[in-house]
Amino acid sequence: MKRLARWVSVAAHPFVVVLLLVGAVEAHRGAAAAARSVTTVALLFVLPLAVLIVRQTRRGAWSTVDASDSRERPLLYLVGAAGLLALFGYLLATQPATPLLRGAIGTLGMLAVCAAATRWVKVSLHVAVAALASAILLGRGIPLGWLLAGVLPILAWARVAMGRHRWIEVILGLVVGAATGVLIVWPP
């Protein structure tokens, strides 16, 4: 079961979900524009986090690639926030009308809430990002949101089965992520 849980966690990893979300939201502008947006988010937000994760795990500073220990989370949040601010600045300068601006700020707020809660509880970022993406996609009428909504209970189970989180942490991820997604798309 742990092997299955690991595969679910990898397939629904926040990096994968974020890039799917961006591609789906930007698809209405055409394939080339969506690919540019996905590449921009990958370079400014996902890549710095991926480099951090590889660096921290290879040198033994983190126990897992998920920053599973609460003491590992502040650096993860700091790099994530820096990436989101860089993304926001770039989008503001190059595409001020894109809905990705609101998404970047909303996601930054979600990270801030999760970071603040870390003192007491380690909110599941896997579940938070999947819930955020599902809420945004559903709010925009994009059917991929239903698929992500269906994956959420399986992902929550996987995170608990792997021992990365407790049930309260995945439930908080669901609530924080969904609420953030609703705030990002409301009002339209």
Image (tube, rainbow, N blue to C red):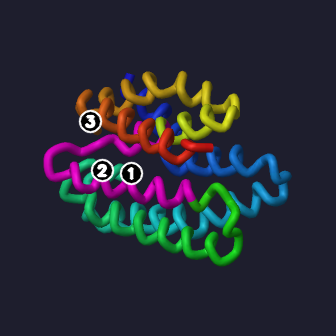
> What is the CA distance from the residue labelled 1 to the residue labelled 2?
6 Å
Q: Distance between the residues labelled 3 and 1?
A: 14 Å
Classify 10 Å Cα crowding around label 3: few (below 14), some (14-19), many (20 and above). Answer: many
Tag nearer the camera, 2 or 3:
2
Whether 116 is among the magenta residues is yes
- Describe the element under mark 1 as helix, strand or loop: helix
SS under mark 2: helix
Q: Nearer the viewer, residue 81 or 65?
A: 81
Nearer the observer, 90 or 58 = 90
Q: In the rendered structure, which disc, 3 or 1, sits on the residue that comes first in sequence?
A: 1
From the viewer's perspective, is 115 left or right of 132? left
Callout 3 amino acid: Glu
Mark 2, residue position: 114
Q: Identify residue type, mark 1.
A: Met
Q: Given contact means CB atoms under 8 Å apart, are the residues at marks 1 and 2 in contact?
A: yes
Q: Horizontally, is 33 left or right of 166 in the view?
A: right
- Within 10 angstroms of label 2, few (less than 14), some, or many (20 or more) residues? many
Looking at this rendering, what residue extends furthest in the front direction?
187
Residue 110: give its label.
1
Q: What stretch is highlighted in magenta?
A: 102-130
Q: Image point 53% across, 61% down: which residue?
A: 46
Residue 169 numbered mark, or none = 3
User: Can you give x and y, in whole percent of width and height, for residue 105 in the image?
Assistant: 48, 60
Q: In which quarter of the image is the N terminus?
A: top left
**Residue 50, percent across and down?**
48, 62
Q: What element carries label 3?
A: helix
